[in-house]
Structure formats: C-alpha cells, structure tokens
C-alpha cells in the first residue's frame, strides 16, 4: 500500500500518508453490514445475501444512491479480524453468500479477512459486487477467494463515464474487466436450491434519456455471449442527482425501459432480470437506519 495501483485510477500514492481518489487511506472502513434481500433472486435465495458495504469508491457517480458511504464515507474502521467475525455472523444468520459491495480499494485487507473467516470454518461463497471499473490485475487477486461476480456495466461509451462518474476510460476498462471475468468465471450458476454458486452476472441501470447508452452495453455483452445473465435495472431516482443534465433530473420513462428490455430479448439473452417501474421508490437506502433498505434488509 506504499504505492496503490488497486483500481484503474492508478494513483500510486502511499495510502499510509494520504487518501486516494477513492477517498480511502490506510484503514479499512465499513459503512454497514446487512442481511439484504434486495438483490437478484439467485443472490438472495434462502435467508438473503450477507452484504458488507465499504466506505469510499474509485468512481464519482453524480447520482449515487449510496453516497452516504461511497462519497461521505460515513462508517467505522474495522480490522481484518473484525470483518472476518462479521462474515461468520452473516453465515450464522443463514445468508447465502458474502456480498462485498465496492471492495476494490480495500482488496488486500478483505482477502486477509476471508482467509481468517475460512480458517474459522466459513463456507459461504464470496461475491464481488463492483462498479465494473476494475483492472485485470486486481480481479486476478480475487480469483482464489471469490466465486461470484456481480459487475455493473454502467455506460456504453466513455463520454457518459466521464460526464456522470468522473472517469474518462470507463467503457474501455469495464469491457476488459468483463471479458476477463467471462473467460475465467463463466456465467452465473445456481445450485439445486436456486442459490448462486459461482460465475458472472452483469447489471445495467438504465438512465433517463438513454444517457447510459444501454443498446451499446447489450450489444457488447451479447457479442461475448448470450449466456451471460443480465440484470436490467429501472430503479434510477433523480433525487440523488447533483448535476445539470436535464434528462437526469427526471425519472426513467416506462417506454425507455421497455425498449431496453425488448432489445435484450431481441439479442437473445438467455436470462434477463428486470424490475418494475416502482423500483425507484424501493431502493433508497439510509445507512443510518436499522433497516437501510426498509423491509428488504436489516443491519447486523
Ligand atoms: S484504490 Fe484508491 S488509492 Fe488506489 S489507485 Fe484506486 S483511487 Fe487510487
């Protein structure tokens, strides 16, 4: 950590002396540990997903619903041993997986936690839940520790990534990350009880005015393989947006969302997860509450 190159920003800074663009320094900070039912069905089968939300993020999305922790970094410092104990408690609650939300900038700490939890008997699969803004090198570090990859592919061009998330190379970087995961992890596979056991699932949040370029996203994914399960999300809520693009100040239109779902079907994807148009009222977390996602979750 004397020169951090964990994410594609490649700051190279000494994290013991300063925070990087991810707003993270030398201590592992956790925003919330949650038993969570608000993910795709294979990820929450059984008693839910054991989610750990990490503070900070290499991205700067101007509409982030998790801004309390991703940008304001509200949370607490944990040692790798404390995080290992939290993972064991999530397993004790009956969760189906350990769902690491935005873990990239803490990768070495978390790998140590997983090793400690495994040494104490944890058997759950570990899930990397990421913006998709990842290097192959960092993803390679996870290979022996994580089995499930829930990757965003947020934009279908670099301009949108620059305008909305403050990174100029999102489309190039995220495509490469997903190609790598497709080659190494394959599609999401479920066990006989419908629980995800391993593999890749890709998410795309459709933005109003099609600003995220969803057709480009879907065409790229279908070119890799229509076996990749895609989760097409309608939950965009303009109340979080802090920019000045007129379309981003309004909700997603049902016709826009349906056009994206139709495109996914036309391209032949075998598995498409979708949301209803009320989802924008459902996924508005308050990480200071006992139930950050209302009835869909509870803090551990
Ligand atoms: S993880 Fe943080 S410090 Fe490291 S390269 Fe990325 S933004 Fe910079």
Image (cartoon, grey):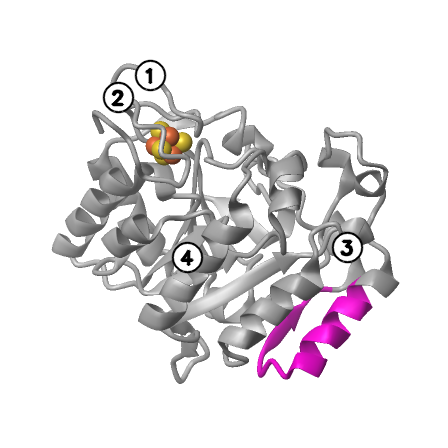
Quarter occupied by the C terminus: top left
Q: Position of residue 255 (x, y in %)?
A: 87, 64
Return the mark for residue 14: 2
Residue ID at (65%, 43%): 159
Q: Nearer the viewer, residue 113 or 265?
A: 265
Q: CA distance from mark 2 to mark 3?
A: 39 Å
Answer with mark 3 or mark 4, whichever residue precedes in sequence: 4
Q: Position of residue 9 (x, y in %)?
A: 41, 35
Picture quarter with ligand 1: top left
Question: Which of the two discs, 1 and 3, sits closer to the camera?
Answer: 3
Secondary structure type for disc 2: loop
Q: CA distance from mark 2 to mark 1?
A: 6 Å
Residue at the outermost left position: 119
Residue at the spot of label 1:
18
The 10 Å Cα crowd at callout 1, few under 14, some 14 to 19, many 20 or more, is few
| Horizontal side of residue 188 vs 65, given as left or right | left
Residue at the spot of label 3:
210
Q: CA distance from mark 3 to mark 4?
A: 23 Å
Residue ID at (40%, 41%): 8
Answer with mark 2 or mark 4, whichever residue precedes in sequence: 2
> Do the residues bearing badges 2 and 1 touch, measured as CB atoms within 8 Å?
yes
Please give the range of residues in magenta: 257-275
Q: Nearer the viewer, residue 270 or 93?
A: 270
Return the mark for residue 177: 4
Secondary structure type for disc 3: helix
């Amino acid at each position: 950590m004397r020169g951090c190159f964990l994410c594609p920003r490649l700051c190279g800074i000494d994290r013991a002396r300063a925070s990087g663009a991810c707003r993270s320094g030398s201590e592992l900070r956790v925003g919330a540990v949650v038993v969570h039912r608000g993910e795709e069905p294979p990820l929450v089968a059984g008693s839910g997903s054991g989610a750990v939300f990490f503070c900070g993020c290499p991205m700067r999305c101007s509409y982030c619903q998790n801004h309390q922790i991703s940008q304001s970094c509200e949370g607490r410092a944990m040692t790798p041993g404390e995080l290992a104990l939290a993972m064991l408690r999530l397993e004790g609650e009956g969760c189906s997986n350990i769902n690491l939300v935005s873990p990239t900038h803490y990768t070495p700490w978390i790998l140590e936690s997983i090793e400690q939890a495994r040494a104490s008997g944890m058997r759950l699969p570990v899930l990397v839940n990421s913006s998709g803004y990842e290097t192959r090198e960092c993803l390679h570090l996870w290979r022996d520790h994580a089995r499930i990859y829930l990757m965003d592919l947020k934009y279908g061009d670099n301009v949108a990534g620059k305008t909305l998330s403050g990174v100029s190379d999102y489309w190039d970087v995220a495509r490469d990350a997903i190609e790598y995961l497709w080659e190494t992890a394959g599609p999401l596979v479920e066990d006989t009880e419908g629980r995800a056991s391993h593999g890749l699932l890709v998410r795309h949040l459709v933005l109003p005015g099609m600003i995220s370029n969803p057709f480009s996203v879907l065409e790229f994914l279908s070119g890799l393989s229509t076996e990749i399960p895609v989760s097409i999300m309608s939950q965009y809520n303009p109340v979080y947006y802090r920019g000045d693009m007129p379309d981003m100040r309004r909700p997603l239109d049902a016709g826009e969302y349906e056009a994206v779902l139709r495109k996914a079907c036309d391209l032949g994807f075998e598995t498409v997860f979708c949301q209803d148009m009320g989802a924008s009222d459902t996924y508005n977390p308050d990480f200071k509450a006992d139930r950050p996602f209302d009835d869909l979750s509870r803090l551990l």
